[in-house]
Image: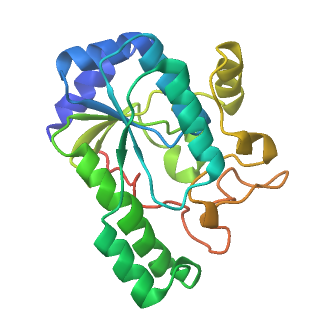
Amino acid sequence: MDASIISTLLAKTKDFTLEETLLFLTNEFPEKVVFSTSFGQEDQVITDYIFKNDIPVTVFTLDTGRLFQETYDVFHKTLKKYKKQIEVYFPEAASVEQLLQTKGPNSFYDSVENRKECCFIRKVVPLKKALAGNEVWITGLRAEQSENRQNLDLFEYDDNFKIIKFNPLLRWSLEEVNAYLKEFNVPQNALHQKGFVSIGCAPCTRAIFPGEDIRAGRWWWESSHKECGLHGAKKV
């Protein structure tokens, strides 16, 4: 990837609104712009922007097979509200079967390596399939979410997935996200009202306590960078 492409995107869109940037990207990369949603608060903001403005971005989600019922509920409400298609990608059945047969259903609790193996099978491999052939990947990442994300730019090149990553909500605060969702009556995951900030697979996510880091509820039993392998972008 030529670093000048990222610099050009940053320069051309620096004064654009989110809608203007999305339209610019879909014009520059027709049918090659995708958005991955896990139906969290940030993702619902972007979904609302895309769907209500009929922006030609393919929206997809990863169903790991271990999601909360509340996540499926907001997925269903989103489909009913916008009447738009959301593509679904599942992990390879054979890989999941082998993992459970050899290590059992809760191997991720035993070590960081086992947890990353489960994330790789259930999330990273399906994501590679979803991103294949595309040029721009839109995410709901915010700088406040973790120390790892504070040095990101609005545009990055993800060397792992070989794709341009656009992080439109990077500088938004959680208060701004919540205000948007309330103003436009966007469907939300009910778990957000129960202390869940970052929501992933059910066995790996808990509510956070007052004063805890925003990512403390993810893989709470381990000391790690609290990432699953989806967002390990390298700057060019």
Q: Quadrant of residue 2?
A: top left
For the rendered model, the colour scheme is rainbow
Q: Quick check: 224 left or right of 213?
A: left
Q: Quick check: 149 left or right of 25?
A: right
- x and y percentages locating residue 72 in the rendered image: 57, 44
From this view, report whether residue 168 is shown above or below residue 55. below
Q: Is residue 50 visible?
A: yes
Q: Quick check: 193 left or right of 201?
A: right
For image coordinates 28% across by 13% down, the residue present is: 24
From this view, report whether residue 87 is shown above or below residue 187. below
- x and y percentages locating residue 5 in the rendered image: 19, 29
Total numbered badges shown on the rendered structure: 0
For image coordinates 41% across by 86% down, the residue present is: 101
From this view, report whether residue 123 is shown above or below residue 221. above
Q: Quadrant of the N terminus?
A: top left
Q: Quadrant of the C terminus?
A: top left
For image coordinates 51% across by 52% down, the residue present is: 148
From this view, report whether residue 30 is shown above or below residue 154. above
Q: Quick check: 85 left or right of 2?
A: right
- x and y percentages locating residue 67 in the rendered image: 56, 56
- x and y percentages locating residue 48 in the rendered image: 51, 20
Q: Quadrant of residue 200?
A: bottom right
Q: Is residue 198 visible?
A: no
Residue that lies at the very extreme toward the bottom in this rendered image: 102
